[in-house]
């Protein structure tokens, strides 16, 4: 019996038992209450107690059997696991109904279960984060055994080797002996360049859009404009990549040529602009919610002092909303740091250390993709460099989050 068939049969057995346990448990509690006996909990809570008594042991048996099979300690047939789970569910079903009595603290039991479920969800998220970080650190340490950390952080040439460069279209730049040079500065320069361009586009437009919708627009206009802005957040990034490569890049090249500047068709400016357009809904929506949450009494107090609407927005509303705006800005920065598809399609993959946004550059995430999708072995420096890049990018993102937390707290203290 396959795993899918076992799961379907298990669900087909547990779901009806759950429904039956809830209704029978509630009916028994209501009948007891109708006799004039005072219950500790509400009737529906006794029904849920019956469901919990049936489902929790059954799920525990199924999980334990799956864990034993996964670890290879004991291999149990699917039919046996299914039978054990259903028998446990039936026993729990009977126990749950028999345990219902006026003194049963069903509400307390359900509260403890919910508390444990929430704690488990929190622990799962924490353990997942720790596992991700440790996996990246361990693989990055393997890379740093072969490449100097100082060379990696301060090096200005990224040339990993033959296979990577052929995949990236740069097979003419290989170091002697087929080795590689792993200076990450050009990659992070491209990442910060495209992020800066994106935020220079997204922050003013997003913030001004939020101010317009919350302070100036009528309800009808707001109901039309806000959904249109939020539609941008649902467009796939590959569509933005096509837009950047086919529409924005030729416009940038033509404008640069008009001013006598030489612009590459794989420049970093085009994906930065399009990435900023993509991030506008995040900043606009979050900033709009923050501005709308500011008490109206602050505006009315400013108007009573004789300030104009624009002065009130500049001196009262925006400072009060600044912590939320900073959070929206840093959310946009994190979104830009992790974007890959737009850069691949519009800017290319050539590591280039330059201050000129009209030249071609690439980012850390693009090189991570190419490092992990090449034909080199997994333990090669070219592949392991992806984990080193990911580790440094993680540290950068964590630092930004810490800075944002400190800044938000400081602004809140000043405002309070």
Image (cartoon, helix red, strand yellow):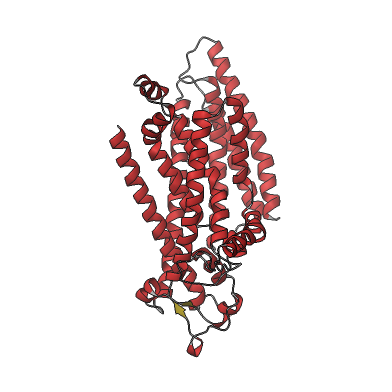
- The front one of 40 and 399 is 399
Q: Residue at x 67, y 40 (%)?
A: 13
Q: For residue 395, which quarter of the picture?
A: bottom left
Foreground pick, 369 / 221: 221
Q: Is residue 379 visible?
A: no
Q: Residue at x 46, y 48 (%)?
A: 331
In the rendered image, the quadrant that contains the C terminus is top left
Q: How many marks?
A: 0
Picture quadrant where residue 54 is located:
top right
Q: Nearer the viewer, residue 80 or 140?
A: 140
Q: Position of residue 146 (x, y in %)?
A: 41, 79
Most distant residue in the top direction: 36
Residue 89, percent from left and from top: 59, 39
Please identify the residue farthest to the front as the structure is shown.
259
Q: How far across and down, in percent of the image, does residue 127 sit? A: 43, 53
Q: Position of residue 35 (x, y in %)?
A: 54, 10
Query: In the image, is residue 190 above or below residue 197?
Result: below
Q: Look at 40% across and 74% down and name the residue there.
A: 152
Looking at the image, residue 70 lies above or below residue 303: below
* Above or below for 282 versus 390: above
Residue 200 can be seen, yes or no: yes
Q: Residue at x 33, y 45 (%)?
A: 407
Q: Quadrant of the N terminus?
A: bottom right
């Amino acid at each position: 019996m396959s795993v899918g068939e076992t799961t379907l049969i298990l669900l087909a057995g547990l779901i009806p038992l759950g429904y039956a346990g809830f209704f029978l448990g509630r009916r028994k509690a209501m009948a007891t209450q109708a006799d004039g006996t005072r219950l500790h909990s509400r009737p529906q809570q006794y029904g849920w107690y019956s469901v919990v008594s049936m489902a929790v042991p059954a799920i525990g048996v199924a999980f334990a059997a799956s864990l034993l099979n996964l670890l290879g300690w004991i291999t149990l047939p699917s039919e046996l696991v299914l039978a054990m789970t259903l028998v446990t569910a039936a026993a729990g079903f009977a126990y749950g109904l028999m345990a219902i009595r006026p003194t049963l603290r069903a509400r307390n039991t359900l509260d403890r279960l919910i508390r444990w479920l929430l704690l488990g969800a929190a622990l799962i998220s924490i353990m997942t984060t720790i596992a991700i970080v440790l996996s990246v650190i361990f693989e990055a340490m393997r890379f740093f055994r072969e490449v100097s950390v100082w060379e990696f952080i301060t090096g200005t040439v990224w040339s990993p080797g033959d296979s990577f460069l052929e995949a990236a279209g740069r097979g003419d730049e290989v170091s002697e002996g087929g080795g590689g040079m792993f200076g990450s500065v050009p990659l992070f320069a491209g990442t910060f360049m495209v992020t800066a361009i994106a935020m220079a586009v997204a922050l003013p437009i997003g913030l001004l859009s939020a101010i317009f919708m919350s302070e100036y627009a009528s309800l009808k206009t707001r109901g039309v404009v806000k959904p249109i802005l939020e539609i941008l957040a649902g467009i796939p990034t590959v569509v933005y990549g096509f837009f950047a490569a086919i529409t924005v890049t030729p416009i940038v090249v033509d404008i640069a040529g008009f001013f006598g500047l030489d612009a590459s068709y794989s420049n970093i400016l085009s994906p930065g602009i399009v990435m900023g357009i993509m991030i506008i809904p995040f900043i606009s929506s979050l900033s709009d919610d923050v501005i709308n949450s500011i008490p109206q009494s602050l505006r009315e107090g400013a108007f009573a002092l004789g300030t104009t609407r624009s002065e009130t927005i500049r001196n009262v509303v925006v400072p009060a909303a600044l912590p939320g705006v900073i959070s929206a800005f840093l959310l946009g920065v994190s979104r830009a740091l992790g974007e890959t598809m737009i850069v691949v399609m519009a800017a290319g993959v050539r590591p280039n250390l330059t201050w000129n946004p009209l030249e071609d550059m690439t980012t850390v995430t693009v090189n991570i993709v190419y490092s992990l999708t090449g034909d080199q072995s997994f333990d090669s420096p070219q592949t392991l460099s992806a984990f080193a890049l990911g580790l440094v990018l993680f540290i950068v993102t964590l630092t930004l989050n810490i800075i944002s937390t400190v800044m938000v707290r400081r602004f809140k203290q000043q405002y309070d």
